[in-house]
Amino acid sequence: MTELLDLADSVVARAKEGELVEAFLTRSRTTEVKAYNGDVESLNSAASAGIAVRVIVDGRQGFAYTGALDDPALHETLEEARDNARFAGVDEFNTIASPDGVAPPDLVVDTGKLAGTPVDRKVELALQLERAARAGSPHIRGVDTAMYGDEVSVSAVATNTGVRAETESGVCYLAASVMAGEGAETQTAFWYGVGRHLDELDLDEVARKAVDRAVRMLGAKQPASRRLTVVLEPLMTAQVLSLIGSTLTGEAVLKGYSPFGERVGESIGASNVTLVEDPTDPDAFGASCYDDEGLASRRVPLVDGGVLRGFMHNSYTGRRSGEGSTGSAARAGLAGSVGVGPRAMALTPGTLTPEELYASVGDGLLVQNLKGLHSGVNPISGDFSAGAEGMLIRDGALAEPVREITIASTLQRMLQDVRAIGADVHRLPMSAAGVTLAVGDVTMSGR
């Protein structure tokens, strides 16, 4: 990894008097294998590398990037960012990160084992997954997707203000989507497994859960509309928390995109809701020693016992708000500007197993799939509406399957109406961990 950091140093060393310069470099390799009908449908392996440079002069910020790391490319990218700054508007809060005295967490992320895995083994995992899914039940009519994927990446950032940081990350996964049928009816379902290396992937569990979830949806009908308690499976909870997390950033607050902008110190959730952004947690897939500006990662309390404690910030939003960075800078690739976002949010779990949580709910709806989530949620107003399917809960146990429904509420009400939080924390390569979550007073629209 020191090669990238050396290259970053070489760029910022060219800074002129009066300039603030930041160089962010990355290198990654991805693999994806898809199996179909007992054969390899596709095998893709790709490597990428590049640099993004920011230059700030007198409050004017210039940005440029390229997908190459040779010396001419580094020089040209710096010059392009420098030239772009000349034509930018003045913003007195434009800045790059400076060391803030926070020590990075003692994390060790070793991607060597994943990076050194032979491609043949990855191919065989995809083929085995398809075979296991096809054999999982007499009701299985086909396997839409049986795939293995992984990504290993390294990044480095340096500034002429003294920031020097490098990180690495690696994740691999298995995913299966199957079709179950009975008569003229067909239902599909999906499941996945995630790990930092192949030994952490449970192929049999991925196949079994994909099959079980498809088979249990056979006979699904559209239920009557009513208000009820909704229980979100961990993947659904992680998706909803990611949306909530996007409203708890300094960027969203400054742009007026957050329904929680003026509510620090107020109760915004039920008393059992404690939400933390913690990229120092070694079990989180988003764990890292540094954020994307090179500042040390740290634990950021967001909601404590239902009370809003604060927001995530990068250097810009921290300076503009007067609160300072929380080490939460995030980039959407080299071409994206430096934003703010969570990497490892998690709800403090409860003590109930999923079955115990169903029993505590009594009557409700277990949601195993949400559709149109991002288009159906307004992060400014908090309005929430999404297509769903799953299982009704009756007398504390799973009952008949339902489909063609919409569930609706608001993000604000959902936080206030959290009835129970499960103990089953699921780590995902997403910005939030998943957990079984019961939310009361949700509208279910059916027939």
Image: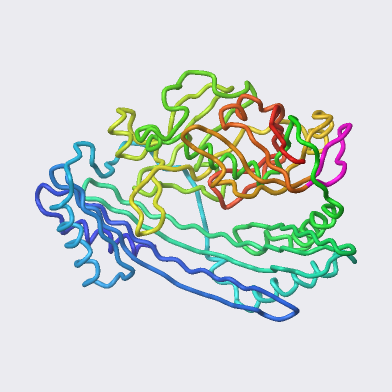
Which of 447/412 is in front?
447
Taking 230 as reference, is 194 above or below it?
below
Which of 328/267 is in front?
267
Q: Residue furthest left?
A: 17
Q: Is residue 399 magenta?
A: yes
- Lateral position of residue 302 relative to residue 162, left or right: right
Q: x and y percent of residue 25 in the render?
A: 34, 60
Q: x and y percent of residue 149 in the render?
A: 60, 66
| Quadrant assignment for the N terminus | bottom left
Helix, strand or loop for the magenta stretch, by majority: strand
Name which residue lies at 53% across and 43% down: 344
Taking 401 as reference, is 26 above or below it?
below
Q: x and y percent of residue 177 in the render?
A: 72, 63
Which of 240/54 is in front?
240
| Quadrant assignment for the C terminus | top right
Q: Residue furthest top?
A: 266
Residues rendered magenta in the picture: 391-402
- Lateral position of residue 430 relative to residue 3, left or right: right
